[in-house]
Image (tube, coloured by chain):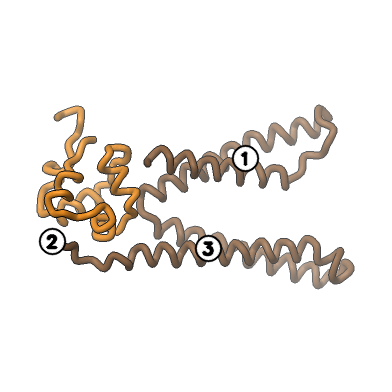
Amino acid sequence: MKNRLKVLRAERDWTQAQLAAELEVSRQTINAIEKGKFDPSLPLAFKTARLFGLSIEEIFQDEATS
Amino acid sequence: MSHPKTDPNNWAANTTRNTVRLAYWTGAWVLTMAIANFGPRVIWQFNEPLTIVAILINLLVGFGMILANKRHLNGLDEMHRKIQLEAMALSLGIGLVVGLAYRNLDVTNLIVSNAEISHLVILMALVYLAGIVFGLRKYR
């Protein structure tokens, strides 16, 4: 699964640690999601979407369909 | 630069607290295990009631450790929980399969030494540690 997390974070000038604190996960988890090594659960994807004020599809894209 | 609103220390502080709590319970369990194991021989010369009390205390502290571990797992974020659960699954699976094969080697006299449960505990602990290291590297 691809995602725009790194771009969205950079646009707001947030560090991985700040985003991690906001989403209540570790910085390593944010790093793994950004690199596409770990796919977040649906609740975490919703929480991320809420934080950025976007829909889930605007942040996460299924590689099979994109 | 816009700042997130959440207190960044809450979640991390909770995780640290759960980890420290688990470390205390684990330490207490190891200590009570040592007392239950060596106490009868070294301290109270096989006094049966004292041995039973020591074993019961060790059991109770063990259950406390299990609950602390459950709390620790529930407090982790989803990626670290996945790493922990995969390491535990690996440890349990290898412990069961290799442990029983090891016992078969013993009961059929294919090995000279006795199959000790401590060997199984060491194997499971090493596999668990290797699983954690592998998991952390996988998602790095």
The x and y percentages for residue B124 are 62, 43
- The residue to which callout 3 is attached is B22
The x and y percentages for residue B84 are 46, 48
Please report contact status of discs 2 and 1: CB closer than 8 Å, yes or no. Answer: no
Q: Nearer the viewer, mark 1 or mark 3?
A: 3
Q: Which quadrant of the rendered structure holds the N terminus of chain A?
A: top left
Q: Nearer the viewer, mark 2 or mark 1?
A: 2
Which numbered disc, 1 or 3, marks the residue that appears first in the sequence?
Answer: 3
Please state which amino acid type lies under the numbered disc 1: Gly
**Between residues A20 and B40, which one lies in front from this camera angle?**
A20
Please state which amino acid type lies under the numbered disc 2: Ser
Q: Which quadrant of the rendered structure holds the C terminus of chain A?
A: top left
Which numbered disc, 3 or 2, marks the residue that appears first in the sequence?
Answer: 2
Q: Name the image quarter holding residue B122.
A: top right
| Pointer 2 chain | B
Residue A26 appears left or right of B108: left
**Between residues B61 and A5, which one lies in front from this camera angle?**
A5
Q: Is disc 2 on the same chain as disc 3?
A: yes
- The residue to which callout 1 is attached is B95
Dot 2 lies on which element?
Answer: loop
> In this picture, is B133 found above or below B60?
above
> How many residues crowd mark 2 within 10 Å: few (<14), some (14–19), many (20+)?
few
Please state which amino acid type lies under the numbered disc 3: Leu
What residue lies at 23% left-to-right and 66% top-to-bottom?
Answer: B6
Q: Name the image quarter holding residue B51.
A: bottom right
| Pointer 1 chain | B
Residue B60 appears left or right of A14: right
What residue lies at 67% left-to-right and 47% top-to-bottom?
Answer: B121
According to the rendering, which colour does chain B have?
A: brown
Dot 3 lies on which element?
Answer: helix
Residue A3 appears left or right of B104: left
